[in-house]
Amino acid sequence: MAEAAAPAQLARMRKLVLKCGLAPGDIVMLTAAVRDLHLCYPGQFATDVRTLCPALWENNPHCTPLSDADPDVEQIDCFYPLIDRCDETPYHCLHGFVQFLNQRLGLAIKPTAFKGDIHLSAREKAWYSQVRELTRQDIPFWLVAAGGKYDVTIKWWASDRYQAVIDHFRGRLQFVQVGEWGHHHPRLDGVIDLRGRTNLRELIRLVYHAQGVLCSVTALMHLSAAVETPRGRRPLRPCVVVAGGREPAAWEAYPGHQFLHTNGALPCCLKRGCWKDRSQPLRDGLPQDRPERLCVDAPGGLPRCLQLITPWNVISSIELYFQGGTLKYLTPRQRKAAERGVGATRKNPFDRQPLHLHSAGMASERFIQTLRPYPGGYEGRGIVICGGGLKYFPGAWICINLLRRFGCRLPIQLWHLGRKEVDVGMKALVAPLGVDCIDARAVRQRRPVRTLRGWELKPYALLHSRFREVLLLDADNVPLVDPEFLFDAPQFREAGAVFWPDYDCGRNRKAAAIWRSCGRRQPDEPEFESGQLLVDKQRCWRALCLALWFNAHSDFYYQHLHGDKETFHLAFRKLRQRYALVPHPVHALVATICQHDFNGRRIFQHRNLDKWNLRRPNRRIRGFRLEGICRDYLAKLRRLWKGWRSQLS
């Protein structure tokens, strides 16, 4: 902000606080209107602003700090209704706020420049750009924004088309990819990757240093015109805009830009821009998903108006700037420096950021497209238990001993997370019981996964265990019978998967958003309780992979689902994979869920809310079967496990 005017001068001015909650591209238009107000009416107004992006107003000489509590201040909520007439009248978006202020204030402001009004300080201009810091050389570069916000996905050109452009100029022109954290910006290869690594002010400085810009109709396009060029450079910064047919070219295009539009080429934008919001629904609950706001011609998800714009169209538009002789391609030395910048930014956490309701549905669809058939290599039947450390190992010990007590001969794998959870002494304890201990962290080196903690371990162990047919048991589950008969149950042989119900408490409203995101209605049946589940990996491979993917993104999905249990339900329903659900409801004991076989016999007691504990007395639960035997095994573990106290640390 500029320094405040002198008190006497300020007293003679009309004081305005201009408010606007629109996106950064719109606020760039407001900067132009404020500039034009002061140039057309010098000394008559003091203006301050309240917007969502104050960085656009830094160093602005037309802004004066004003107090909302000042009774002389007029507070104005700014819009530009002119946009509703932009298809029929010869106006640019720069006229929008100007006309609004004219009508609101009774003025006759006229646009004074064909661009927004963004100001950099002398100090900012003198700073090295982020690109030079990475490359250690001042190289020419083009900014590319290959995505955008989720509210208007119809403006996204396909990332493989952007990549074709990048590849064409590889070694001759260096692209720097930018994009705001939380928005859709798929990674491009061969770029200096600054996605999520710039705030708005840093982006403005990047634009200042950029030789050119490639983007859709977005804030970057407006900044390309609004931000001045360094001394000695051409005054109009090259910019290629992949626009399509959503908006009329006259409303958006700037001098010096190559605005690639398809207005008039298709029935849907024959006479005017379509102004639709999305090419396909994101199922995030926003009104942009309404049918009247969806593209009417988007085969494969890409609007046809953007399909008509080919990579070669964009390549030719960029080459026009070089053919004129004012721009030059990279020298060999600059090319080497550019490669240094590409290498320095190759690892970017942008691609590992959490999903959200806008992105989750689309991300899951992309993942499903990558799923491959069952790979083979898994054999036989077995039991998988996840548990280690002082919290879970006692329960696993009791579970394993009971299985062997009932005559279960199935091989058992005990999965854990690192040596601290299951050390050499613990392995020696379970080895005589025919148990293999599997360190998931070691397996992760060969089979990486985004997230691997507690609940996430269960689908990971299930998928990567050596068995084809797997009974997954929680460590705090107490079997009452040898469960091997379940593998031969007709329901399992027919469906390939058996799940058990959770408490039937009606539909979980919190989970409704996730079911909608996956394009499925919440089924009219209980949620799954995953203290035990039985699957044939050969028949259920794709659904199990999807369940693992949901859990790998637990930082999002667990906000709406209680741990891993409904991720299986969601995955099987999403892929229309068959399963059998035991028809008998849970029998509830204190802190314990009792489950049954298909004939209604109790076979599992999942002590989920009161796990077996070596440090303190364990609660006696009325109706809990075999409790005395369980306590005997616990006492035996205290005697045999010499190192259990070391787990306290």
Image (cartoon, rainbow, N blue to C red):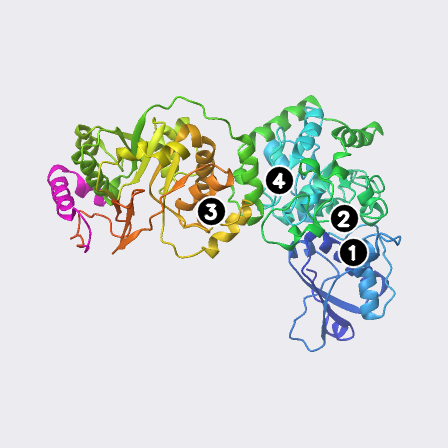
To which quarter of the image does residue 55 belong?
bottom right
Task: Please name the amino acid that badge 2 sits on.
Answer: Ala
Is residue 641 part of the magenta span, yes or no?
Answer: yes
Q: Distance between the Cα atoms at labels 4 and 2?
A: 23 Å
Q: Is there CB contact under 8 Å for labels 2 and 3? A: no
Q: Quadrant of residue 622?
A: bottom left
Query: Which is more foreground, mark 1 or mark 3?
Result: 3
State the residue position of label 2: 226
Residue 185: mark: 4
Q: Which mark is residue 557?
A: 3
Instruction: Measure the C-alpha gap from mark 2 to mark 3.
Output: 41 Å
Q: Amino acid at mark 3?
A: Tyr
- Tell us which disc is closer to us: 4 or 3: 3
First in sequence: mark 2 vs mark 3 = 2
Numbered disc in front, either 2 or 3? 3
Q: Are the two marked residues, 4 and 3, in contact with CB atoms closer than 8 angstroms?
A: no
- SS class of the residue under badge 2? helix
User: Residues under labels 2 and 1: Cα distance?
Assistant: 9 Å
Q: Which residue is mark 1?
A: 32
Magenta stretch in the rendered image: 621-649
Q: Position of residue 221 (x, y in %)?
A: 74, 44
How far apart in space, not on screen, are marks 1 and 3 (Cα)?
43 Å
Which of labels 4 and 2 is toward the front? 4
Q: Quick one: label 4 or label 2, which is nearer the N terminus?
A: 4
**Mark 2 and 1 residues: CB-CB less than 8 Å, in contact?**
yes
Query: Quick check: 520 above or below 367?
Result: below
Task: Characterize the local packing of mark 4: few (<14), some (14-19) or many (20 or more) Cα atoms within 10 angstroms.
Answer: many
What is the distance, in whole Å, between disc 4 and disc 1 at their CAs?
28 Å
